[in-house]
């Protein structure tokens, strides 16, 4: 099964909002509200930002907002900050007990 | 505190085997599904496999079936990944991760280890 599709890179200036998209199929993103988003800095473990499409774990800033429409999930980062520069990955349940990640999006803060 | 610590990585020759371990602490390990996720150099995250909280069920990514085996010992709070017939394409950082919800194996990963590097090279 191919990875979920994410744009390779997105950039924005401090204070701006950016949206990262994650496109799957009717067999994964489109069928299940089990989409999560992760932030990964180089050399560090991934960090859960959003689960079940739009829920935030305790301690995660409300600047991170998840949503889904059809086969595409999105993560919006508002009030972009320098520390938001990282790689971001989506992940979806894909049926039969399996999960699948997106290819990742590199966010650059200009 | 809630923690996962991987071990067992290193340099291994092509065709050989390696077993990775993941030690859990700070939570009721036997209540959570556990996953392995890897990241090859310069590549993205790749979900590999999950084992249910009680070890009764395991699911593998299609590309992992046959060479990788997941197991756990709830009495020791340990998770294992047995990797056989390794190739250069298996060179990656391997992470263990916990399912977000207790008793669930099909959701987000809320606790991650620091990762252990496996390099397959002659």
Image (tube, rainbow, N blue to C red):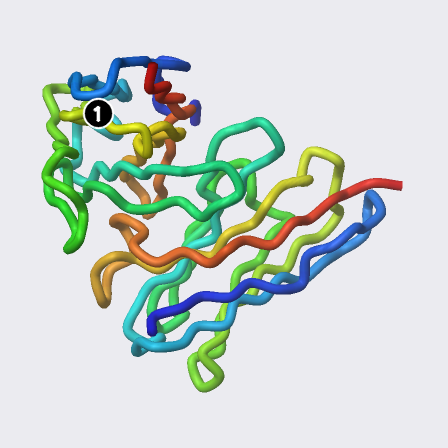
Q: Position of residue A40 (x, y in %)?
A: 40, 38
Foreground pick, B38 / A58 = A58
Left or right of A32, for residue B7:
right
In the image: residue A62, left or right of residue B122: left
- Using the image, determine if residue B79 lies above or below residue A80: below
Query: Going 60% across and 54% down the picture, which residue do you hit?
Result: B116
**Residue in the picture at 25% in, 49% down:** B107
User: Quadrant of residue B110 in the image?
Assistant: bottom left
Front-most of B72 and A56? A56
In-image side of B38 versus A91 (left or right): right
The structure residue drawn at horizontal position 36% and vertical position 28%, both measured from the top left corner, is A85
Q: Which residue is mark 1?
A: A80
Q: Is residue B17 above or below residue A77?
A: below
Quadrant (top left/top right/bottom left/bottom right) for the N terminus of chain A? top left
Quarter of the figure with residue B88: top right
Residue B111 position in % (x across, y down): 34, 58
- Nearer to the camera, A31 or A17: A17
Residue at image x 43%, y 23%?
Answer: A2
Return the x and y of residue A102 as percentages of the image width and height. Answer: 37, 27
The C terminus of chain A: image quadrant = top left
State the SS at label 1: loop
């Amino acid at each position: 099964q191919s990875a979920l599709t994410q744009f390779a890179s997105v950039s924005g200036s401090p204070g701006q909002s950016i949206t990262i998209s994650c496109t799957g199929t009717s067999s994964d993103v489109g069928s299940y509200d089990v989409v999560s988003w992760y932030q990964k800095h180089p050399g560090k473990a991934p960090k859960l930002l959003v689960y079940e499409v739009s829920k935030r774990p305790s301690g995660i800033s409300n600047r991170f907002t998840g949503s889904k429409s059809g086969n595409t999930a999105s993560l919006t980062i508002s009030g972009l900050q320098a520390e938001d520069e990282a790689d971001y990955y989506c992940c979806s349940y894909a049926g039969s007990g399996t999960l699948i990640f997106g290819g990742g999006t590199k966010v650059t803060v200009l | 505190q809630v923690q996962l610590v991987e071990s067992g990585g290193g340099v291994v020759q092509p065709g050989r085997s390696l077993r990775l371990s993941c030690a859990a602490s700070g939570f009721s390990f036997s209540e959570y599904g556990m996953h392995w996720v890897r990241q090859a150099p310069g590549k993205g995250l790749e979900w590999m496999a999950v084992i249910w909280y009680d070890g009764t069920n395991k699911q593998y990514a299609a590309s992992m079936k046959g060479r990788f085996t997941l197991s756990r010992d709830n009495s020791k709070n340990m998770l294992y990944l047995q990797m056989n017939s390794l190739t250069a394409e298996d060179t990656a950082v391997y992470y263990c991760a916990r399912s977000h919800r207790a008793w669930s194996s099909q959701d987000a990963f809320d606790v991650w280890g620091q990762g252990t590097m496996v390099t397959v090279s002659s």
